[in-house]
Image: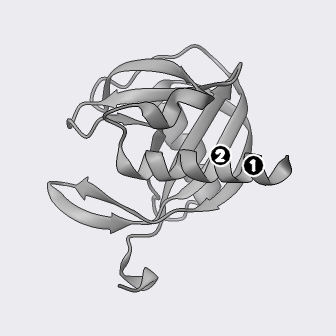
Amino acid sequence: MTRDEYLHGCTGVVVIKDNHILLGERCDDQGWSLAGGKQEKNETLEECAKRELKEEFGIDSLKLKYLGKVYSKAMVKGVEKKVSPSIYVCETFKGQIKLDLREFKDYKWVHINNALNIENLFLPSREGIKLLEKEAGEKI
């Protein structure tokens, strides 16, 4: 399996507030997820991350930091695909959470130390959180 076989041009955003990560419960029954989605034409990956965060959670990122890419699997329009989202961290945002109910049916803030213990965590989100933990560990 080569990395060229993965769906690129997608993002995930780890929103952090007071050592908690924002997760949304997906309407497609793929579990709890970070904000994120597919890049639109003529859009940078950072613009995609900001747009998805606004569309899905109703908040505006004031600053994003690029973490890197992850490699995972996800259901895309009913078909399992290999995906490689670019992961961003957002620690500064404005606005109140307002879910896009076509995407998410609920949300919660989960302590960073417990995020990977979420039983039904969307696989690409799990990989994004692992990447965050890896970077945090390298700084210590």
Q: Secondary structure at mark 1?
A: helix
Residue 138 or residue 39, whichever sits in front? 138
Residue at x 79%, y 54% (from the top left corner): 138
CA separation, marks 2 and 1?
6 Å
Based on the displayed image, in which of its 4 quarters is residue 76 positioned?
bottom left
For label 2, count other residues whose C-alpha is less than 10 Å away and answer few (under 14), some (14-19) or many (20+): some
Q: Is residue 29 left or right of residue 55?
A: left
From the top left corner, tell me how far across and down residue 84 is, in percent: 45, 65
Residue at x 20%, y 37% (from the top left corner): 28
Mark 1 residue type:
Gly
Q: Is residue 97 left or right of residue 75?
A: right
For label 1, count other residues whose C-alpha is less than 10 Å away and answer few (under 14), some (14-19) or many (20+): few
Q: Is residue 134 left or right of residue 99?
A: right
From the top left corner, tell me how far across and down residue 8 is, in percent: 45, 69
From the top left corner, tell me how far across and down residue 39 is, in percent: 47, 58
Mark 2 residue type:
Glu
The image shows a total of numbered marks equal to: 2
Residue 3 or residue 50, whichever sits in front? 3
Q: Of the numbered discs in the image, which one, if any, rests on residue 137?
A: 1
Q: Which residue is mark 2?
A: 133
From the top left corner, tell me how far across and down residue 110 is, in percent: 53, 22
Q: Residue 134, relative to residue 113: is it above or below?
A: below
